[in-house]
Image: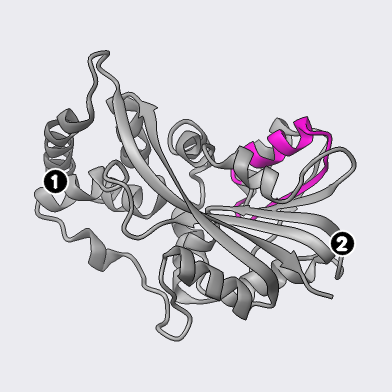
Amino acid sequence: MSELGESARSVWSGQAVAYAESFAAVCAYPIGDLLDAVGAGPGVRLLDVGTGSGNVAADAFARSARVSAVDADPGMVELAAKAVPSAEVGVAELPVLPFADDAFDAVTANFVLDHVGRPRRSLAELGRVTRPGGRIAVTMWAVPGGAGRALLGRAIEAAGVQHKIHRPVMASEADFPRTEQGLVDLLRAAGISKPSCRTIAWDHQTSAQGWWHGAESGVGFIGHLVATQPPETRAEIKRHFDLLSAEFTGPDGRLALPHRALLASGTAEA
């Protein structure tokens, strides 16, 4: 496993409930488009990789797909199994999945490539378990991202913590541009045919306390950084978070946080 993948696994361990109560909502926005891209519907054998708390799997099941789902974290698997009791849910981690070749008609991975150290190999594995002609769709955060996604990072930097140096980086030979063309090229290099990609932009509606809850609970790389600071530093980050949040606060007192993500899809080759 790469340094990035190992770090992601460590950071997300034990965070299933906190994730479901906070950042899962923003990650759920592209689910409809993701499932449309793979033609999820009655009888379609669909695998959701990196299912998290099971939102994609649940929506696929609501479309009458035959759903399987996996996640690297046992806590996430437990939540997903509760969300979709009839689905086959288990622990598994890219870039190696415990399924036979051509096992599924469709495979999805919602914001999973952001956390793997070998993205091309991981995409090739998605293609391996998809039948020839079957559909694969993935999402990941765009770079540059939306201003709302940068809010916590800005608060951390304003408090004097250089957060970018704390996250492991992908090996240069595995890295790629987080752009529409960069993701298309990656899918093509992984053997996925007819790749396409588009940018999705939306304003995530939440409360300031709800958004801060994910960070102070240690969810994700940026939350882990916040939660591991000394109490006085955490308080300073929160002070700046409150100040900066005013930029996104509407008349109702809630935040509207702009986000941008890439949605890419393609077809598994024979």
Q: Nearer the viewer, mark 1 or mark 2?
A: 2
Disc 1 and disc 2 in contact, CB within 8 angstroms: no
Relative to 124, say whether 144 is above or below. above
- The numbered mark, 1 or 2, whose residue comes first in the sequence reads 2
Where does the image place residue 268, in percent across and percent down from the top left?
A: 77, 68
Extreme bottom residue here? 173
- Dividing the picture into quarters, in which one does residue 98 lie? bottom right
**Residue 1 magenta:** no
In this orientation, does residue 252 appear?
A: yes
Quote the CA–CA distance across marks 1 and 2.
Answer: 49 Å
The residue range painted magenta reads 52-73
Q: Is residue 239 left or right of residue 7?
A: left
Q: Residue at x 32, y 52 (%)?
A: 222
- What element does badge 1 sit on? helix
- Identify the residue at image location x=12%, y=38%: 240
Q: Residues within 10 Å of mark 1 (few under 14, many from 20)?
A: some
Q: Which mark is residue 233?
A: 1
User: In the image, residue 69 lies at what x, y percent?
Assistant: 73, 49
| Residue 163 image position (x, y, % from top left) | 23, 59
- The x, y position of residue 93, in whole percent, is 65, 63
Say which of 1 and 207 sits in front: 207
Camera sees residue 218: no
Is 244 positioned to the left or the right of 122 in the image? left
Give the residue type at disc 1: Thr
Q: Picture quarter containing residue 206?
A: top left
Q: Kindly identify which residue carries mark 2.
A: 103
Kind of residue at disc 2: Ala
Determine which of the numbered discs, if any, sits on residue 108 in the image.
none
Quarter holding residue 172: bottom left
